[in-house]
Image (spheres, helix red, strand yellow):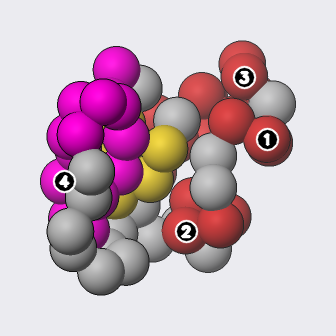
Amino acid sequence: MRALALLAAAATLALGPSAYDSCAARGGCCRICSAGKACGNSCIARSKTCHKGKGCACNG
């Protein structure tokens, strides 16, 4: 878990704070979706429609 927090902090420094959505700002990302988009607690292809509620995955 600590490694994930360090990775998120490093990415924020490299990409800037706008790279993450609001869940990342709260430090609650369980996954950071770079190739796809966040959908609930996982990532899906950007072309797909998410049918899940807000989860812990973040766009990055």
Name the amino acid, label 1.
Ser
Q: Position of residue 46 (x, y in %)?
A: 35, 31
Disc 4 to disc 1, how far (Cα)? Answer: 20 Å
Disc 4 to disc 3, how far (Cα)? Answer: 21 Å
| Residue that label 2 marks | 23
| Residue that label 3 marks | 15
Q: Position of residue 36 (x, y in %)?
A: 32, 30
18 or 49: nearer the viewer: 49
| Residue that label 1 marks | 18
Name the amino acid, label 3.
Leu
In the rendered image, the quadrant that contains the N terminus is: bottom left
Disc 2 to disc 1, how far (Cα)? Answer: 12 Å
Name the amino acid, label 2.
Cys
Please give left or right for residue 53 compared with residue 59 in the image. left
Q: Which mark is residue 42?
A: 4
- Magenta residue span: 35-48
